[in-house]
C-alpha cells in the first residue's frame, strides 16, 4: 500500500516535470527572436564634442552593425553587378590609404577625378570620410545631404522618385546604387546579389536580429561603419597629450595658423576644436566669377551663398590631394600660395578672409614652410592603417582592394 502511494507520488512529479519542460521548450520556440538578440553597444575611442554626435535614434551604433557595414562598404557587388570591371562599392572611390578619398594617384581616377560605371563624372571632387559623426551641418561640399532633405528625387543627380530622402549618411548607399554618376543600377538587383552570398544572413542576424536583408538595413550598417571612422592620433594630438614635442618650425607654423597673420583658425579650428574645421559653409575667395551651380546656394536657394562650400577638415590633409571641391590645387604648396597671394575679391567672400583686401597674407617663404610643417602634424597615419577600417575579405575577388 505504502509502496503504491510512493510510485504515484513519483509519477506525479515526473508528469509535472515533463509538462514544465514541454511548456519551456514551446515558449522558447514561439518567443520573438528579437528578445534573444543582444548586440554590443559600440564605444568610440575618443569623445570630441560627445554632445554633438550625429547618430540617428533609429540607428544606434553596435559592434555588430559596424562590422556588417565594413563588409558592405568594401563589397563590389553593392552596385548590383558582378563582372570584374563593373564592380563598385564605397571603397572604389573612398580609399583608406588616402583618408577615404581616392587620392591624386588613383590608377583609374586620374588626378583624383572620379566617375561612375557609366563614366559620367561626379559633380565635385572627393571628400574624405573622417570624423563625420561630428558633422550636423549637412554632408557633401554643398550640404545637400541634411536633416531637412526629405524629398531629394530629381535633384543633384539623384533619379526622380517619390521614395528618396537625402537626410544622413544612411542615404549614401542607395544614392550610390542609383546615381548615374556612380552605380547607375537598381536597388533590387543589388539586394539580390547581397542575399545570394551565404556570408551575409548571419552578419545581418547579429547586427539587426534578423537575417532579412533590406535596403534600409544595408544603409544603416554602412552608415554605422562610416561613423566609426575616427581619427585622434595625429602628431598634434600626441603633442596635446604631452607625448610629442613640436619642432621649432611646426610650433611657428601653429602660431601662424592660429593668429591673424595666417588667418586659418577662423574657419579651420584650433586645439579646442580638434576636428580642424568649423564645418560651416564659407566662400574662401578663390574666384570672382562663379560657374559651379552646385555650391551651397543650390541647397539653400539663397543667392548670397554663391561660391560657399563646407570648410573641410585639415586632418590628414597630407593625403587628400587634389584640393578644394573642384580639385584645382594638386599640392599643399599650391594651396598655401593661393592663400598667400591669390585671393580674389567678390561680394560673396566671407568677412573672415581678412587678407582678401591685400590679395593674401603675404608671408615669407620660410613662414609658408612653417605653416606647411604644422599642417603635416595633423596627419594620423594610424587612421590609414587601422585594421578595423580595412577590407575584411582581401582574398574575395568581389571585394575592392585598397
Ligand atoms: C564614384 C566614386 C564614389 C563612390 C563609389 C562613393 N562615393 Fe562617396 N563621395 C564621392 C564624391 C565625389 C564625394 C563628394 C561629393 C560632393 O560633395 O559633391 C563623396 C562624398 C561622400 C560623403 C560626404 C562626406 C562629407 O564630408 O560630407 C559621404 C558620407 C560618402 N561619400 C559616403 C559614401 C558611401 C557610404 C559610399 C558607398 C555606398 C560612397 N560614398 C560611394 C565619390 C564616391
Ligand atoms: C573664411 C574661411 C576660411 C579661411 C580663413 C581659410 N580657409 Fe581653408 N578652406 C575654406 C573652405 C570653404 C575650403 C573649401 C573650399 C572649396 O572646396 O572650394 C577650404 C579649403 C582648404 C584646403 C583644402 C582642403 C581639401 O581637402 O580640399 C586647405 C589645405 C586649406 N583650406 C587650408 C587653409 C589654410 C592653411 C588657411 C590659412 C592660411 C585657410 N585654409 C584659411 C575656408 C577657409
Image (cartoon, grey):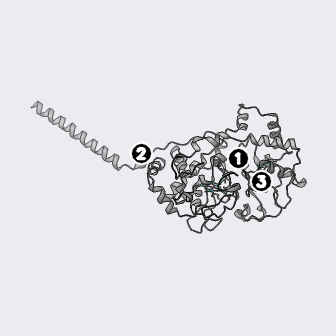
Drawn side of residue 394 relative to residue 277, left or right = left
Q: Which mark is residue 132?
A: none
Residue on which disc 1 sits: 319
Answer yes or no: is residue 140 visible. no
Measured as percent of width and height from the top left, residue 256 is found at 83, 42
Name the one closer to the observer, 212 or 72.
72
Measured as percent of width and height from the top left, residue 188 is found at 49, 63
Name the one closer to the observer, 96 or 29.
96
Q: In which quarter of the image is the N terminus?
A: top left
Judge: label 3 CB < 8 Å from ligand 2: yes
Residue on which disc 3 sits: 329
Cα gap from disc 3 to disc 1, whole angstroms:
13 Å
Measured as percent of width and height from the top left, residue 10 is found at 18, 35
Measured as percent of width and height from the top left, residue 222 is found at 56, 52
Q: What element carries label 3?
A: loop
Drawn side of residue 27 relative to residue 282, left or right = left
Amino acid at each position: 500500500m505504502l509502496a503504491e502511494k510512493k510510485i504515484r507520488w513519483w509519477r506525479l512529479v515526473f508528469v509535472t516535470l515533463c509538462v514544465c519542460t514541454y511548456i519551456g521548450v514551446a515558449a522558447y520556440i514561439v518567443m520573438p527572436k528579437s528578445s534573444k538578440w543582444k548586440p554590443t553597444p559600440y564605444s568610440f575611442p575618443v569623445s570630441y564634442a560627445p554632445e554633438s554626435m550625429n547618430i540617428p535614434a533609429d540607428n544606434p551604433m553596435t559592434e555588430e552593425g559596424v562590422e556588417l557595414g565594413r563588409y558592405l562598404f568594401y563589397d563590389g557587388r553593392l552596385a548590383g553587378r558582378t563582372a570584374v570591371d563593373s564592380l563598385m562599392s564605397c571603397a572604389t572611390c573612398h580609399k583608406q590609404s588616402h583618408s577615404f578619398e581616392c587620392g591624386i594617384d588613383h590608377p583609374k581616377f586620374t588626378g583624383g577625378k572620379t566617375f561612375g560605371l557609366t563614366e559620367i563624372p561626379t559633380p565635385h571632387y572627393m571628400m574624405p570620410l573622417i570624423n563625420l559623426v561630428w558633422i550636423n551641418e549637412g554632408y557633401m561640399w554643398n550640404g545637400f545631404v541634411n536633416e531637412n532633405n526629405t524629398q531629394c528625387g530629381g535633384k543633384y543627380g539623384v533619379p526622380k522618385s517619390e521614395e528618396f530622402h537625402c537626410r544622413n549618411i544612411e542615404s549614401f548607399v542607395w544614392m550610390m546604387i542609383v546615381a548615374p554618376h556612380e552605380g547607375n543600377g537598381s536597388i533590387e538587383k543589388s539586394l539580390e546579389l547581397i542575399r545570394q552570398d551565404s556570408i551575409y544572413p548571419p552578419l545581418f542576424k547579429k547586427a539587426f536580429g534578423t537575417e532579412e536583408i533590406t535596403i534600409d538595413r544595408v544603409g544603416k550598417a554602412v552608415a554605422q561603419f562610416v561613423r566609426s571612422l575616427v581619427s585622434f592620433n595625429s602628431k598634434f594630438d600626441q603633442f596635446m597629450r604631452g607625448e610629442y614635442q613640436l619642432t621649432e618650425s611646426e610650433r611657428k607654423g601653429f602660431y601662424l595658423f592660429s593668429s591673424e597673420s595666417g588667418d586659418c583658425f577662423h574657419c579651420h579650428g584650433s586645439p579646442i576644436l580638434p576636428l580642424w574645421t568649423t564645418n560651416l559653409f564659407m566662400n574662401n575667395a578663390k574666384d570672382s566669377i562663379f560657374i559651379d551651380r552646385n555650391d551651397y546656394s543650390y541647397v539653400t536657394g539663397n543667392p548670397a551663398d554663391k561660391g560657399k562650400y563646407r570648410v573641410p577638415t585639415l586632418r590628414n590633409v597630407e593625403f587628400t590631394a587634389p584640393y578644394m571641391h573642384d580639385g584645382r590645387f594638386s599640392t599643399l604648396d599650391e594651396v598655401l600660395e593661393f592663400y598667400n597671394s591669390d585671393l580674389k575679391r567678390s561680394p560673396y567672400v566671407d568677412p573672415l578672409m581678412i587678407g582678401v583686401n591685400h590679395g593674401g597674407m603675404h608671408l615669407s617663404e620660410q613662414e609658408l614652410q612653417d605653416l606647411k610643417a604644422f599642417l603635416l602634424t595633423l596627419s594620423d597615419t594610424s587612421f590609414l592603417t587601422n585594421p578595423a577600417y580595412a577590407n575584411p575579405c582581401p582574398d574575395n575577388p568581389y571585394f575592392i582592394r585598397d
